Image: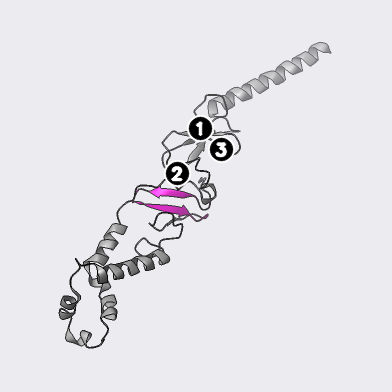
Amino acid sequence: MSFHQRDEIRWNKKGYFERFDGKKYWRKLCVIEGCMKRAKVLNWCKRHYTEQKQKSLITTTTTPTQVPQQSLISSIPSSITTSTNSNSILSANLLFHQPHYHHLQAVSQIPMPPPSYLYTSTSSLSDQSESIFHVRNEIRLNKRGYREQYDGIGHWRPLCIHEQCLKRAKKLSYCKRHYSEQMNQNQSNSTNIKNEKDNKD
């Protein structure tokens, strides 16, 4: 059984953050730090993809190390160059054929180290009391005051309510052994009470 809540965020081993949609799917988030939008194009949300595209265009037209525009034009068939008289429009059309754009695409695929501003849910981002990184067998108290143990694969398992017991809770919040002991103790107490009543009679 999954204990994930809607808008809960986790770090995927593939190198990006995901947010739980409240049903059963983890949705990839934009790779820009602090952005909580869903990734749409090349691991960016639509807004940041547009911004990166514009930055690429500006870098292409202003950076001296880029290939001169005239050499790019000369390498294009004359049927294309005659169809437009604006070098700026031509530069925009060439954007996706230049090495700089593919460099940006490659950078977007590099796994990022998890920033400190992301936590288990958007409602607790300001709290910063619980990191999304958990270690196997880590123990915490849930909202109801019961202990839970992390299984290492994304789930928190309830522990036996008996003090210092690290077994999984099975019945009535007890592990199997302590459940049996508790039932035997209850039965013994019930028998003692019954015997006391019989002796008084």
* Tags 1 and 3 touching, CB below 8 Å: no
In this view of the protein, which residue sits in the foreground, 142 or 36? 36
Provide the residue span drawn in magenta. 5-24
Q: Nearer the viewer, mark 1 or mark 3?
A: 3
Which residue sits at x=30%, y=67%?
A: 56
Q: Residue 142, which numbered label?
A: 3
Q: Residue furthest top?
A: 199
Which residue sits at x=43%, y=48%?
A: 10
Quarter of the rendering occupied by the C terminus: top right
Q: Which element type, helix, strand or loop, lies under badge 2? A: loop
Residue 25 in picture, x, y percent from top left? 46, 55
Q: Residues within 10 Å of mark 1 (few under 14, many from 20)?
A: some
Q: Which element type, helix, strand or loop, lies under badge 1? A: loop
Q: Residue 132, which numbered label?
A: 2
Residue 141 magenta: no
Tag 1 residue: 168
